[in-house]
Amino acid sequence: MPASRHFCQKVPQATPVAVFKLSNDFKDDPNPMKVNLGVGAYRTDEGQPWVLPVVKKVEKLIVADNRLNHEYLPILGLPEFRSSASKIALGEDSPAIQENRVGAVQCLGGTGALKMGAEFLRRWYNGNDNMKTPVYVSAPTWENHNSVFANAGFKDVRPYKYWDAEKRGLDLAGFLGDLETAPKHSIFVLHACAHNPTGTDPTHVEWMQVAEVMERRKLFVFFDSAYQGFASGCLDKDAWAVRYFVTQGFEMFCAQSFSKNFGLYNERVGNLTIVARDADNVRRVLSQMEKIVRVTWSNPPSQGARLVAITLNTAELFAEWKDNVKTMADRVLLMRASLQAKLQALGTPGTWDHITQQIGMFSFTGLNPKQVEYMIKERSIYLMASGRINMCGLTTKNIDYVAKSIHETVVNVQ
Amino acid sequence: CVLLVTSAAAPSSQRCLSWWGGVQMGPPDPILGVSEAFKRDTSPKKMNLGVGAYRDDHGKPFVLDCVRKAEALIASKQLDKEYLAIGGLGDFTKSCAQLALGADSEVLKSGRNITVQTISGTGSLCIGANFLSRFHSASRDVYLPKPSWGNHTPIFRDAGMQLKAYRYYDPSTCGFDFNGALDDISKMPEKSVIMLHACAHNPTGVDPKPEQWKEIADLVKKRDLLVFFDMAYQGFASGDIDRDAWAVRHFIEQGHKIVLSQSFAKNMGLYGERVGGFTVVCNDAEEAKRVESQLKILIRPMYSNPPMNGARIAATILNTPDLYKIWLEEVHGMANRIIKMREQLAANLKNEGSTLDWQHVIDQIGMFCFTGLKPEQVERLTKEFSVYMTKDGRISMAGVTSSNVGYLAHGIHAVTK
């Protein structure tokens, strides 16, 4: 067979995903002082990954349970996982759950949940197979949001104003303005809490304003909830926005990830929670979700879902989990306070209050691309070109070095 | 739906106030739906011969010993749960490719394959279909054998490919329509994609013989077709993993640059862990790198990176000689039990007094048997005997045991006499 005629010959090299390239560069760096403030995974104060104690406990339970096997889960996933996961997002006493108008699809991580939601919306929302419905993602947002919706077929993925670089906070007027001018029925991807990458969340009052416009203009609410519990340390607090929208009567999707709050990154545990007008609508939606699941992965992986379900449905384990989550959130809060204090003490030019005002794993430092390059090249401190740092990469041992480096960078590089 | 017109048909329903008023109820999945119907049945004699999941002779799910041992080994290592790379666990993808292509494969030595970890066989086919759709611009046509696994069609269609068919199963012989297949293949436009089941064809259990595979390979080369192998039953067909991979390896030796989907659901009993692989055999290592970069671009917006648990178990088994040996024995054991059940079913049908020819039950290979039952007969078998199977007459032999094979023969005879 002539080599020149094979189709792979013409396949072009794709640019690598930025955040993974960053991690690779970090790995190859010989500098003993190097710090990785790139990828979003929790680290202990020793800079190590942390398998939650409750997870270790439940894993042992699973291994010891001879009744368990590796059989296929149902297409939509493990029922006890789906319902308990939705309860986490919506609240034990959610009116929507009581009214039996909540459904869920177990998915592969938050990404998988976003994908399922996007694929469903493209097929069934605002007409049939309507690829022209605008999908709005925050400016900036997690970069994969764009690809998820584009790959689902949406032709018009656009930004909505969110981050005000000058005042280093939420551009509320811009956000509300874009909501007012978005074509009716546009889809909006909202970060439930701990906005990635800015760490800047709307206040309750601001969320209420957003909801008011969205209701009036008939815009679709698609929450991305990847950090519930991780932001404030409290599950309920972090779910305030999602639950508020439910009380306002919205039909919506909420893509949940248990990667961070359970530390189950590589087990791909996610849940797409669906809030609809009534049980009949939920039923029909789920039946069509099954069709999409069937051509993508047939049924989801069992290990992670089992683990989460056992934890959420067993009182002592649930309590222990909440405690583990608080441990992680508290360490992040401590690092925020520490970094801000050190920069202030150093007299680093600019204001650094945004470090403690922002919430969750990430902070948008405000460093510009040239400054970021300097940090990487001269100080072996790896962060995203956007200036985003993962607070979890900071430890009591490296925080002085990082603070001094930021100081030096800001002073020397403009 | 903005206007509120509540009709008599939906008085209390909130359809018109919902975004989802126009969403129709989807039909149950033809294969997985069978299991759900089976679960609802209260008959003590019920049999689930629907989905292809192996059962032991007590009708129970079978967790392989090598899997349990691998799990214990893994647990003792106290590994972290950090994200895998987009392409999956390296230890897994390497050994996955090796299992399919053979340890001495020139392809592996030259590094001209790219193998990514996938969400079992379905995930692999999904990635493959989308990869071809995006990059194989020369043709939109995918030729499936007639019949093929039911889920092949929606997977490729959803990826934007056009489904076509080639003759495969001969209902008059319950065997392989070799001449029909060759005839159809000879007429396929160049660059079309042809789907081949590597072994243990699903749903028919009818596989080409090696000499027939050789002719197919030659003709496919002449027609310059792109070969997509689906190998979901390596080890499960004959009990011998090398024998079952023979066709795949032959095609590669003949110079075909195949794409290949693998599943470890059945041969390792890792169904719910979702373990699979997708391989593209390229011209050289440089091309493989480019292809890899594009596969990552496809995977990331689907689920970012694959699940660890099952891949870790599979990799441990494949890379630990003691466990590998146990695995080969267990796969052989599963295949043997199925062969025995085939023989018993045929014998029992004869004992029931059936005058029909049931030789195909023995001749067919792998988990499934294409009984030849018509939809009406299948319906009767389900309604009157609580035997659950797919409408095309396919039964999963894995669901047959020495205690229920007699009952099954009785039922089949009753609806076919």
Image: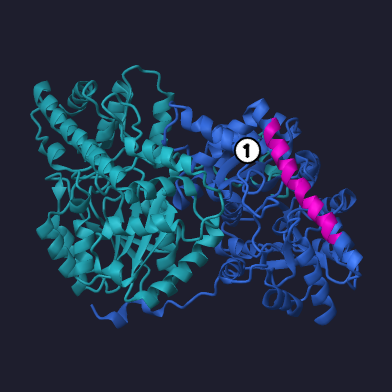
Chain colours: A blue, B cyan
Frontmost residue, A77 versus B15: A77
* Label 1: few (<14), some (14–19) or many (≥20) C-alpha neighbours in 10 Å: few
Q: Position of residue A167 (x, y in %)?
A: 89, 68
Residue sitting nearer the eye, A212 or A114: A114
For badge 1, the amino acid type reads: Pro
Whether A322 is among the magenta residues is yes
- Which stretch is magenta? A319-340
Q: Quadrant of residue B178?
A: bottom left
Q: Residue at x 13, y 26 (%)?
A: B349
Q: Which secondary structure class fits the magenta region best?
A: helix
Q: Please provide percent x and percent y for residue B319.
A: 34, 51
| Quarter residue B367 falls in | top left
Residue at horizontal 47%, vertical 70%? B294
Residue at 62%, 66% in the rendered image: A19
* Residue A156 in the image: above or below residue B124: below
Vertical order, A71 against B306 (above or below): above
Say which chain tag 1 marks.
A
**Secondary structure found at label 1:** helix
Q: How many marks are shown on the rendered structure?
A: 1
Q: Is residue B148 magenta?
A: no
Q: Is residue A87 above or below residue B3?
A: above
Asked if one can make out residue A170 in the rendered structure from this viewpoint, the answer is no
Question: Who is closer to the viewer here, B157 or B3?
Answer: B157
In this figure, which residue is indicated by the disc labeled 1? A53
Q: Position of residue A391 (x, y in %)?
A: 74, 58
